[in-house]
Image: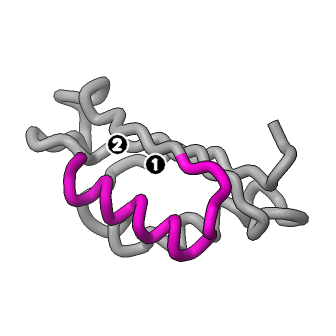
Amino acid sequence: MGAIFEAIRNKLNHAFEPTRLEIEDDSGRHAGHSGARDSGESHFNVTIESQAFAGASRIARQRMVHQALAEELAGPVHALAIRALAPGEA
């Protein structure tokens, strides 16, 4: 895994102590598209489950993740698909 992948994983683990964290580098599917980089690590899909999301709306959860990854989203990450869940949600 690359440096950006590791930064995302470390920051999400630190911020949310997730019970489930899946990160997929989806950059290969976006080659040649706007924002895609030849080196990859520009498009990610994240599924995260954490007690921190309990009672929060979908928008609030997205904002929480965006805040934790503000540095990556301001630079190397062009797109981030987020599925943020509280424990027990499907």
In the figure, is residue 80 to the left or right of 61?
left
| Residue 41, image x, y percentages | 25, 46
Residue 49 in the figure: left or right of residue 65: right
Q: Viewed as shown, does residue 86 lie left or right of 16?
A: right
- What's under tag 1, amino acid-wise? Leu
| Badge 2 amino acid | His
Give the left or right position of residue 37, taking residue 28 as reference: left
Residue at 21% across, 59% down: 3
Q: Which residues are magenta?
A: 1-21
Which is more toward the observer, 47 or 65? Answer: 47
Q: Please check the rendered image and state whether residue 19 is part of the magenta-colored stretch, yes or no.
A: yes
Quadrant containing the C terminus is top right
Looking at the picture, how far across and down is residue 49, in whole percent?
69, 53
| Secondary structure under the numbered disc 1 in the rendered image | strand
Residue extending furthest toward the front? 19
Q: Position of residue 85 (x, y in %)?
A: 74, 50
C-alpha separation, residue under disc 1 versus residue under disc 2 = 6 Å
Kindly identify which residue carries mark 2.
43
Q: Say few, some or many: other residues with alpha carbon within 10 Å of mark 1 (under 14 / 14 to 19 / 20 or more).
A: some
Determine the residue positioned at 84% across, 43% down: 89
Which quarter of the figure has residue 7?
Answer: bottom left
Magenta: main secondary structure equals: helix
Q: Is residue 31 magenta?
A: no
The residue lying at 20 percent from left, 51 percent from top is 2
Q: Quadrant of residue 39?
A: top left
| Looking at the image, residue 38 lies above or below residue 57 | above
Quadrant of res 23? top left
- Label 2, secondary structure: give it: strand
Q: Taking 41 as reference, is 70 above or below it?
A: below
For the residues bearing labels 1 and 2, Cβ distance under 8 angstroms: yes
What residue sits right under mark 1 in the picture? Answer: 80
